[in-house]
Structures are given as C-alpha cells and as structure tokens.
Amino acid sequence: MIYILTSLRFDVSIPDSFLYDVSTEIDKTMKIFQLSRALSIFRVNNVYIYHDKLLNANKNDLQFMVTILEYLDTPQYLRRKLYPKLEILKNVGKLHPIRSHHHKDRLEIREVKTGEIRVGVVEKRRDAYFVDVGLSIPIQYDGKFRHDGRKVNVKLLRHKNYISAIDIEKNEITELYWGYNLHQIRDLKNIIDKFPISNIILTSKHSKYFKPSENEFSKLNSFLGNNSILVVFGSPKFGLNSILSKEKMNISKYYSYNFFPNQGTQTVRLEESIYGVLSILNICLLFP
Amino acid sequence: MIYILTSLRFDVSIPDSFLYDVSTEIDKTMKIFQLSRALSIFRVNNVYIYHDKLLNANKNDLQFMVTILEYLDTPQYLRRKLYPKLEILKNVGKLHPIRSHHHKDRLEIREVKTGEIRVGVVEKRRDAYFVDVGLSIPIQYDGKFRHDGRKVNVKLLRHKNYISAIDIEKNEITELYWGYNLHQIRDLKNIIDKFPISNIILTSKHSKYFKPSENEFSKLNSFLGNNSILVVFGSPKFGLNSILSKEKMNISKYYSYNFFPNQGTQTVRLEESIYGVLSILNICLLFP
C-alpha cells in the first residue's frame, strides 16, 4: 500500500496559450493561482509548457504565467528576496496561500534539528557563501551551487556552535511533495515521445469517456511502476485532436479520454479541466 | 446506458459559512463563481444551504451568496431585468459565463418553433400577462403564475399570427440540465434525514479514502435508482465530524469519505473540494 501511495507521480503538459481566454491581470493571476493549487494538491512534479502553434500566444503572457507559477511555488520566507517588487506580481498579495509541504514556517535557530531539509537561496558575503532558509540569520553553505541568488534544497546540520547547510540528494526528500518544476518546450511531440505510451493520458472532449472500471485502464495502470504519468491538456480554444494533428501526430495512437460525461455546461474551462482530471486520476490510479 | 446516464442526479449541501475565509467582495464573488460553475458542470439540482452553528456566519454573506448564485443561474437575456443595478453585483460583470443548457441565446420571432422551452419572467401589461423569454417582444402568457416579475419555465406555441407561452410540467424538460434551486435550511439534520442513507455521501478529511473499486461503494450505487445523491460538505473551518456532533448526529452512521488521498498541500479549500468531489463522483457513479 505505502509503495503504491508514494510511487504515483504526475507530470502535466499544458499549452503556452493557457491565458488565451482571459484579458485582465487580475483574471490572469486568478487563473494561474487555480492552476498552481491544482498542481500542488495533486503533487505534480514537472509542468511541460508546450508551444501551441495554433494560437501563437503572446510571449508576455507566457512570461507572466511562468513568473507567477514559480513565485507561488516559493516558500513565503523567500518570496520577497527572490521577487523584489516585480510589477506583474501586484495582484498576488491577495491570493490565498498554497501551503505545500516545502512551504515551511520561519524557524528559530534553537529549533533547528540536524537533518531538517529546507528550500533556501544562496548568498555570497565577502568570500563566503551562505544560504537563507528562513532562519533569523544566514547559514553557512557547504554545497556546490555557489551562485548568488540560486535556489537550492539543503539539509541543515547542527554543530556545537553553529549550523551549516549541505546539498541534498533528490531521494532524501521524504515529504510527500516538494513543489513543481517548470519546463518550456517548443513541440508537444518532444515531450510525448519521451514517455512510454502506457504512461501518457491525453484529455479531449471528443474522446471516449474515462471509465475507472474498464480493462484498458487497469492495463494502463499496470505499467505505472515507478514512472510518472504524463497528463496532457489542450488549449482554451482548440482540443488536443487539432493541436496534435498540427504536429502531425495521430491522437488515436494514445490513451485519450473525456473526463466530464454529461457536462451541464457548454464548456469546461482549462483550469477546471486540469483540476477535475487530476482529482479523478489521483483517486483512480491510487486505488485501481 | 442512456438510462444510467440521465438518472444520475446530484444534490449538494453546503454551510452558510461558505464565505467565512474570504473578506473582499471580489474574493467572495470569485469563490461563488467557482461554486456556481461546479454546480452547473455536474448538473446539481438542489443546493441545501444549512446553518453552520459553529461559525454563525454573517447574515449579509448568506444574502450575498444566494443573490449571486441565483444571478449566475439566470439566462443572460433576463439578468438585467431581474437584477437591476444591484450593488452587490458590481463584480459579476467581469465573470466568465456559466453557459448551462437553459442559458439560451436571444431568439428572433421567426425562429421560434412550437415546443421550444425557455426560462422567462412574467410581466403584467394593463390587464394581460406576458412573459419575456429573450425574444424581441413579450409573449402572451397563458400559464397560471400570474405575478409580475415571477420567473417561470414556459413552452412556446406558434399560432397563425402570434406566439403564446404555457406552463410546462417538470418532466417536459429533456435537456440534460436546467439549473439549480437554492434552499436555506436551519439544521443539517433536517435534510440528511430526508434522504435514504444509501443516497448520502459525506465528505471529511478524517474519513477513510474513497476507493472507486470497493464493494461498499457499489452497494451504495445500487440504491441509486431514480433518486438524487446528496453530497454534504463541511465548512471552511470545521469538518463534518465537528458540525454533525454539534447537531448530535454520529458521522459513523453514514457513508463518509476523504476524496483527496496524499494531498500535497496542507488544506483543500471548500470550493476546490466541491469541484473535485463532484468530478470524481460523476465519473464513478456513471461508470461503476
């Protein structure tokens, strides 16, 4: 059981036209916030933002989305330092917190225990490197990413008279979730080709309904192993069938489903679709 | 198949403290919008807003929520007439449309076919009653709800020289969904007692995980018949276990589940929970 629980990992691929159907900065910020919440609640590790060749979205929108997504994934104690008064962030102050597991509270020096893992940012002071991990003072950094302003995951070590921080290996993180990584890619094909077909789930209004109890689905699930499931979404305007055919790919080669049988509205918005599909897959893949 | 598809109907019960954790009017409006979208996408018929005795929410918040929910369920062509310049609606203009099946477009007189069913509002002119159904002129109303301003569902009849409207029976609506009805109730107990236990699903972080493939669940499902499933939610602050125990009810008597296994964030917000739970139940109850 525990094995199944912890080995289910999601990656998500969304178009750079994500913001196509919203115009004001407040609306865009809200839509990105809903996305960030969905990614965080369902433990999405990698977000592949593919270039949507049908809509050719505004590059500023992409920058806006990436910046706010990264901001929201950053622990509160580092936000002001990493994002000093950025104009596009003027509406994020009003957002509710994400509260992922790596968004830890500020800590007193005396509370630090050896082995505590935290997100920090590297700072050069004279010739020495320190890391800000949300303590009242910067901590001596003994890791290898010696670039001022670099975001790192570190493990704290308590010595007699001081505390130091070293780099961690990825598998040292034992929390259920440690935030998402963003990747911008030119062709959706590139990322789809990197996953075994059995680990890819496409979402499309024009595909058959997803049925948790179906054989096909347990086959899909049996391939899970220790790999991630890549869940791919279309744009606010065009479905994946159109987007894939523009990339000269055939949607029928893949597992593709409609997750909203009998929808009571004419459309399900992209941010709603991402949230709903991940809700369903999280339950159905954890408890097949 | 068709039988199963059309006979799955949801009712939802939420607390009058729904807006407890948001303070600005924009935030409140956004949260209600998300709720209205979830209710509409998943074809919720009845929304029972119960009084949460633990939080004792502000009465203005309840009025705010009810008004905006009703506004959003109203077809566009009637909104300005039914809600003339209401102060609390000042932010709804920015919201995306709901686009339920009963939110029909305006229609030209020549396009009207006998049998077309539309939402209208009754208007008295001198001694005759008319109904505004989004045509360029009011239509002669031959139904029995003769109160100025009353919202009605009517069927249009095309005669030689004019069009008239008559009341419909509820089972004449063949669309998949025709909007939600709001009900305010004092005690959660009252509404729970009106449903057979097999048609009630409680949601609680402290309950066991919902597992689509489990026996218990198919038992639940077999009772569905032609009745609605009542899905009950706790408040932004307290879970259903606390709320029910205040009502001297025992949560263990009911089917109660946690729908968010391994959540990557410390909390799932109420509007997110409603959306996610209905996504899951819609798929799992349609395709058991």
Image (cartoon, coloured by chain):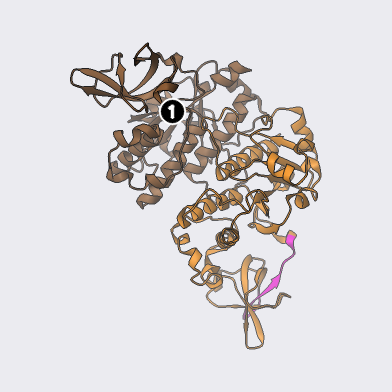
Chain colours: A orange, B brown
The quarter in which the C terminus of chain A is drawn is top right
Q: What's under tag 1, amino acid-wise?
A: Gly
Chain at tag 1: B
Q: Which stretch appears magenta?
A: A158-170
Q: Secondary structure at mark 1?
A: loop
The quarter in which the N terminus of chain A is drawn is top right
Residue B237 in view (yes/no): no
- Residue at image location 60% in from the left, 54% down from the top: A57
Q: Is residue B226 above or below residue A31?
A: above
Which picture quadrant has residue A178?
Answer: bottom right
Seen from the viewer's position, the closer of residues B36 and A73 is B36
Residue A167 drawn in magenta: yes
Left or right of A227: which side holds B269?
left
Residue B235 in view (yes/no): yes
Seen from the viewer's position, the closer of residues B245 and B256 is B256
Seen from the viewer's position, the closer of residues A87 and B244 is A87
Seen from the viewer's position, the closer of residues A6 and A223 is A223
Where does residue A254 sit, x and y in percent of width and height? 77, 38
- Residue at image location 66% in from the left, 33% down from the top: A206
Residue B135 drawn in magenta: no
Where does residue B54 sit, x and y in percent of width and height? 36, 41
Which picture quadrant has residue A161?
Answer: bottom right
Where does residue A268 sit, x and y in percent of width and height? 55, 38
Q: Is residue A203 above or below residue A146?
A: above
Q: Mark 1 highlights which residue? A: B179
Q: Residues within 10 Å of mark 1 (few under 14, many from 20)?
A: many
Left or right of A223: which side holds B218?
left
Which picture quadrant has residue A224?
Answer: top right
